Image: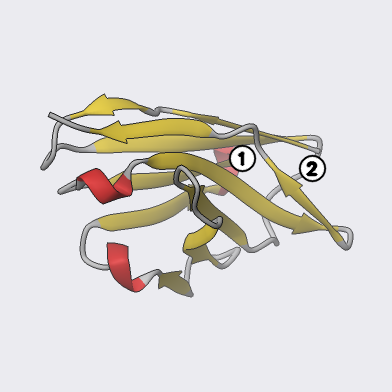
């Protein structure tokens, strides 16, 4: 099982980024997928989660209305569209899945929001 995040980078406040999480070694269809983030000297926190059909989605209060999680099961990929980015969104963003009773994490992708 492998999760590979991409799409991070440096963006100005108010800007947008789209993160991708490509899964391999398993078919993510049938599994709840999540995005987490961890800022410098902060605890890792849940950002968003999506059910295997996309019917159920949850977001952290801090990103509601700005971030959108989605999935393309045919491409075995999960996305996080981030709009109206703020400096406090600066963090390493991780993709997560609980598969076979084990938590799997990607290596993370760094998002820096700064002018």
**Quadrant in the rendering for residue 2:** top right
Q: Residue 26 at x, y = what percent? A: 79, 42
- What residue is shown with label 2? 26
Q: Residue at x 55, y 57 (%)?
A: 43
The CA distance from mark 2 to mark 1 is 9 Å
Discs 2, 1 touching: Cβ within 8 Å:
no
Secondary structure of the residue carrying tag 2 is loop
Q: Residue at x 49, y 53 (%)?
A: 42
Does residue 14 appear to the left or right of 39 in the view shown?
Answer: left
Where is 75 relative to 84, above or below?
above
Residue 113 or residue 58, whichever sits in front:
113
Q: Residues within 10 Å of mark 2 (few under 14, many from 20)?
A: few
Q: Residues within 10 Å of mark 1 (few under 14, many from 20)?
A: some
Q: In the displayed image of the protein, which residue is found farthest to the front?
A: 41
Q: Give residue 85's mark.
A: none
For marks 2 and 1 on the same chain, the one whose residue lies earlier in the sequence = 2
Q: Residue at x 52, y 53 (%)?
A: 36
Q: Residue 63 at x, y = what percent? A: 29, 62
Secondary structure of the residue carrying tag 1 is loop
Q: Residue 25 at x, y = what percent? A: 81, 35
**Can you say which quadrant of the picture contains the C terminus?**
top left
Does residue 105 appear to the left or right of 18 in the view shown?
Answer: right
Where is 86 relative to 52, above or below?
above
Total count of labels: 2
**Can you say which quadrant of the picture contains the N terminus?**
top right
Q: Residue at x 19, y 32 (%)?
A: 114
Q: Give residue 76's mark.
A: 1
Where is 22 relative to 87, above or below?
above
């Amino acid at each position: 099982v492998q999760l590979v995040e991409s799409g991070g980078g440096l963006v100005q406040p108010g800007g947008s980024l789209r993160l991708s999480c490509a899964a391999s070694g398993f078919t993510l269809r049938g599994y709840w997928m999540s995005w987490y983030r961890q800022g410098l000297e902060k605890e890792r926190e849940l950002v968003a989660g999506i059910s295997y059909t996309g019917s159920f989605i949850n977001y952290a209060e801090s990103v509601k209305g700005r971030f959108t999680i989605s999935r393309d099961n045919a491409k075995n990929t999960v996305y996080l569209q981030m709009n109206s980015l703020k400096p406090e969104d600066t963090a390493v963003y991780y993709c997560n899945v609980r598969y076979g009773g084990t938590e799997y994490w990607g290596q993370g992708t760094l998002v820096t929001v700064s002018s």
